[in-house]
Image (cartoon, helix red, strand yellow):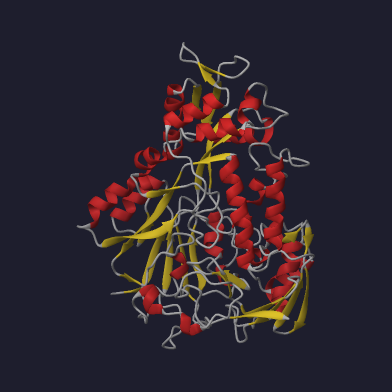
Amino acid sequence: MKRRVLACTLLVALIISSGVASALELLDPRLLDTENEFGDSVGQYGGTLAYAAGTSGPKTFNPHQAEETSSTDVTDHIFEGLVVLHRDTGLVLPKLAREYEISADGTEILFHLRRGVSWHDGEEFTADDVIFTFDVVYDPDVGSNSRSGLLIDGKPMEYEKVDKYTVRFILPRPHAPIMLSIGTPIVPEHLLGDAYREGRYGEMWGLETDLSAIVGTGAWRISAYRTDQELVLVRNDNYYEFDYAGNQLPYLNRIIFRYYASADTYTLAFFNGEFDYYSIPANLYPEFVDGEALSHWTIREAGVDPGTSFLVFNQNPGFLPEPKLSWFTDINFRQALAHAVDKETILDAAMNGKGYIQHSPISRRNAFYFKDNLKTYAYDLDEAHRKLEAAGYVLGADGVRRDLRGNPIEFDLFTNPGVPVRQVMGELFQEDLAALGIKVNFELLGFDVITEKMTSTFEWDAIVLGLTGTFDPNGASNVWLSSGNLHMWHPLQKSPQTAWEAQIDEVWRAAQEAMDPNIRREYYDQFQDIVAEQLPLFYTVTSQNNVAVRNHLRNATPDLIGGSIGSAWNFIWVDR
């Protein structure tokens, strides 16, 4: 028996009316309503949208040579994959595939491709392009960033062309996260095939390439590029998607990427009207609030930022000396100190209150997998004191807290400069632990130095750090599996050091094999409970994404996955 997912004829930017739905459910177009998402169901043709794209432009136009977001921010609008993530729920929907079927045992995926899709040069998109793309991605000599996410236990999937519009993938074992990677950009065999077979793929579509030769299936084509200054995308007049009224998308004629020397420069440029929307840094939010009433833009909430900030203790027995190793590996010590993390003050001082308290290792923006009713540790220094005393960490008459062997408790805490939330966290933690009789030597170090300590020398006590986050929990496998290179408190373990780490390994791999999202959620609930109990990381806060949008833009609703309106470009129109 196979379970089928049917594609609606609309862009994935449209929302499922009742929120989260299983990725394996039938997607009925009647459940999708542009009025709910955008307010204006039908747009007007023409106009330009300008966008601040960072401090430097792309390094390549080849999606499988791109290693930095400055490149993928461009190529993601030129090339498309078999599937795409829904912009608000993060669930997997068909894209260049019109539907897909997953076998009952989860080891086979059959993709039925859209018919009538053309490359920008007019050639038809077919199964040959899909097969060619996966040949490219799996070739280690190409070095595609997509490759690692498409390996299962280090093995590639098998894949074959069934017919001109059908492709079959065979998995070594069930692996639900594969659906998040299988949407890798499809590239044209008729333009790149010969170069690949001749070993020249890495030379293709660099910055010196004639822009008209860079061909995708997406709604946008590259028209012009001035290095690190401006890049122009123009409408693909033969794009295959339409709005409800039967109008071909996109509405806009052009998208302009503008590059600025620094964040301060493009903040000023937005105030001067040089581009149309801006993701507001939390520390600048008051400025935007003050200017909103007299401006021609509106602040719109864009959901929870996927990134996290946390404090982590070193628990690596090969590198951390005693008595610190005994302290940091003691769950009672960690649970006691968790009561000394003043998350409310961190949120107010570092983010102007525009954010959320974070307890879970899974971002709250992923409402499907995020578990809200976890064990928590309220900020309470009296409770921290009681738990330390009960665990044998006694406060002496001299105001110094010592362990059972009489060792005074003192350790170093590092973070990198330039990230207010981390510095505030470190300063508050240092102050509160001093009140508990524990000396914390808080120091700012360069990010490269901290990275070397965490991944190479392993010579550190505690660090305040952050991760950018991934929407699906499995994207953090290298953090949570005991063998992971970012299993920060003790990386690259040959076998789990503790029973609870072994339990996470077991639950995590079971979640990978559960093709049914509802079953995966049960496993991730167990994972979050283990983390809340064991506290390998002390989570602090995460910010709220806010976007300032020019009032002449219509349908410019930020998505809840990336916090940007970039995923809605095909639907945006300009009120001129």
The extreme bottom residue here reads 246
The extreme front residue here reads 390
Q: Quadrant of the N terminus?
A: bottom right
The answer to whether 563 is drawn above or below residue 436 in the figure is below
Q: Quadrant of the C terminus?
A: bottom left
The answer to whether 420 is drawn above or below residue 179 in the figure is above
The answer to whether 404 is drawn above or below residue 285 in the figure is above
Q: Nearer the viewer, residue 235 or 446?
A: 446
The answer to whether residue 268 is left or right of residue 105 is left
- Residue 19 appears in the picture as rendered: yes
Q: Name the image quarter holding residue 341.
A: top left
Number of marks in picture: 0
Q: Name the image quarter holding residue 521.
A: bottom right
The x, y position of residue 201, in whole percent, is 72, 63
The answer to whether 73 is drawn above or below residue 321 in the figure is below
The answer to whether residue 186 is left or right of residue 363 is right
Q: Nearer the viewer, residue 273 or 158?
A: 158
The extreme top residue here reads 398
Q: Nearer the viewer, residue 553 or 339?
A: 339
The x, y position of residue 16, in whole percent, is 47, 75
- Residue drawn 67% across the image and 68% down it: 515
The x, y position of residue 146, in whole percent, is 67, 60
Q: Nearer the viewer, residue 57 or 8?
A: 8
The x, y position of residue 482, in whole percent, is 70, 44
The answer to whether residue 506 is left or right of residue 301 is right
- Residue drawn 71% across the image and 29% down it: 317
- Residue 80 appears in the picture as rendered: no
